[in-house]
Image (spheres, grey):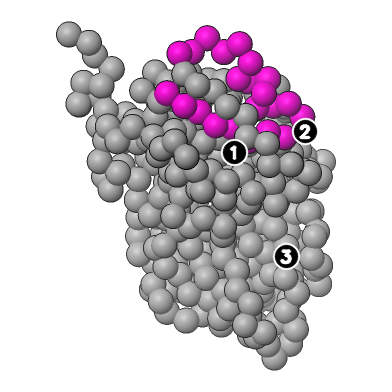
């Protein structure tokens, strides 16, 4: 197989930014046309930075194929068919197919959940996460043109990887039956809830919240922690929040356009490898997705480590590229 280590991959979640939370809250809608335009701009940026081969995941809505058709760039543009069925396994199959080809750098279009799916399947991936989802702490609101350029610079080895793309934090969870899972930003335990629920969290149902990133300017349950303390992505720590009646009323933006008062009883800083016990009975939500039901007396063990995907810092990468004169011909 031809060496594709300097290629750029693109994985776009076609249904990110389009679920019921647009009705229950005021989240923006990311249309197929918007994603198509973003992909095209990212490809143009990647090629401008030197990428000669771009591979994009095919999905049933023609987003990637429409973006790459007749795009005026001097590069080999390829659509990767993984038999997409519009479910999270599409993302998994695309990520693993790109990994098998040797592609290292992936531009993602989605929210926290999309990137968690990739991290779970391929924790060594190098990502440029562009926000098109609902919970958007892990991905950033970055112009796709320069995001693509950053991806191209890293793929072509024109900048030092360790300087511009640090490993991200991940929460590792071990259940009573021995099964495991991960989260990138937050894990929440919820009373009186159920697996698959897509509605915004009822603040009175929150019991425990473990977050890797806590900032007051984010949206989602991680903002609850961020309104009490700060824990940035570069810090080797996490924050554990205990909620419940009698706690300090914290007015938090738990969804776009939706502030709710959350009773917070305790906020504690957690070190890497420190064991945290998350207890039932509860529904567990990972990066906004409710996926596990936990029974009483069956605690879940959680630890935080810095072993998640590398995340390309777009500004730092372009600064490094500019300092090397990549974009200047003399």
Measured in 3D between alpha carbons, the distance from the residue under mark 3 to the one under mark 2, in whole angstroms, is 25 Å
Residue at point 41% right, 37% down?
3
Question: Would residue 281 be seen by someone viewing this image from the given angle?
Answer: yes
Residue 96 placement, left or right of 307: right
Sequence-wise, which precedes: disc 3 or disc 2? Answer: 2
Residue at (47, 27) in percent of width and height: 53
- Seen as rendered, the residue at the extreme bottom is 297
Q: Which residue is mark 3?
A: 291
Q: From the viewer's perspective, tell me whether residue 41 is left or right of residue 320.
A: right
Q: Earlier in the sequence, mark 2 or mark 1?
A: 1
- Tell me, for residue 60, which label it has, or none: 2
- CA gap, disc 2 and disc 1: 13 Å
Between 54 and 146, the one lying in front of the other is: 54
Task: Tell me how many marks there are.
Answer: 3
The x, y position of residue 18, in whole percent, is 76, 38
Query: Mark 3 or 1, which is nearer the eye?
Result: 1
Q: Position of residue 231 (x, y in %)?
A: 41, 59
Q: Which residues are magenta?
A: 52-74
User: Which residue lies at the image location 50% right of the left edge and 48% below the top edge?
Assistant: 99
Disc 1 target residue: 11
Is disc 2 surrounded by few (<14), some (14 to 19) or many (20+) residues within 10 Å?
few
Q: Check residue 62 for magenta coloring.
A: yes
Q: Position of residue 265 (x, y in %)?
A: 58, 75
Q: Earlier in the sequence, mark 3 or mark 1?
A: 1
């Amino acid at each position: 197989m031809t060496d594709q280590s300097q290629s750029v991959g693109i994985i776009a979640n076609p249904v990110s930014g389009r679920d019921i939370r647009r009705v229950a809250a005021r989240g923006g809608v990311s249309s197929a046309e918007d994603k198509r335009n973003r992909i095209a701009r990212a490809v143009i940026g990647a090629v401008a930075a030197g990428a000669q081969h771009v591979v994009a995941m095919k999905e049933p809505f023609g987003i990637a194929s429409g973006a790459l058709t007749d795009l005026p760039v001097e590069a080999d543009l390829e659509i990767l068919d993984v038999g997409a069925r519009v479910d999270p396994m599409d993302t998994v199959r695309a990520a693993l197919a790109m990994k098998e080809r040797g592609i290292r750098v992936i531009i993602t279009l989605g929210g926290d959940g999309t990137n968690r799916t990739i991290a779970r399947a391929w924790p060594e991936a190098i990502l440029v996460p562009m926000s098109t989802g609902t919970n958007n702490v892990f991905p950033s609101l970055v112009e796709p043109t320069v995001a693509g350029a950053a991806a191209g610079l890293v793929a072509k080895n024109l900048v030092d990887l360790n300087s511009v793309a640090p490993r991200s934090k991940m929460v590792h969870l071990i259940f009573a039956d021995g099964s495991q899972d991960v989260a990138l930003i937050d894990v929440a335990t919820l009373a009186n809830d159920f697996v698959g629920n897509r509605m915004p969290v009822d603040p009175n149902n929150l019991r425990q919240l473990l977050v890797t990133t806590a900032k007051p300017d984010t949206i989602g349950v991680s903002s609850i922690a961020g309104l009490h303390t700060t824990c940035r992505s570069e810090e080797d720590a996490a924050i554990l929040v205990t909620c419940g009646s009698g706690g300090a009323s914290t007015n938090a933006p738990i969804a776009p356009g939706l502030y709710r008062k959350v009773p917070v009883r305790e906020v504690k800083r957690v070190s890497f490898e420190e064991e945290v016990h998350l207890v039932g009975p509860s529904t567990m939500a990972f990066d906004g997705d409710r996926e596990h039901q936990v029974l009483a007396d069956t605690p879940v063990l959680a630890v935080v480590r810095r072993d998640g995907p590398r995340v390309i810092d777009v500004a730092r990468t372009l600064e490094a590229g500019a300092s090397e004169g990549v974009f200047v011909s003399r």
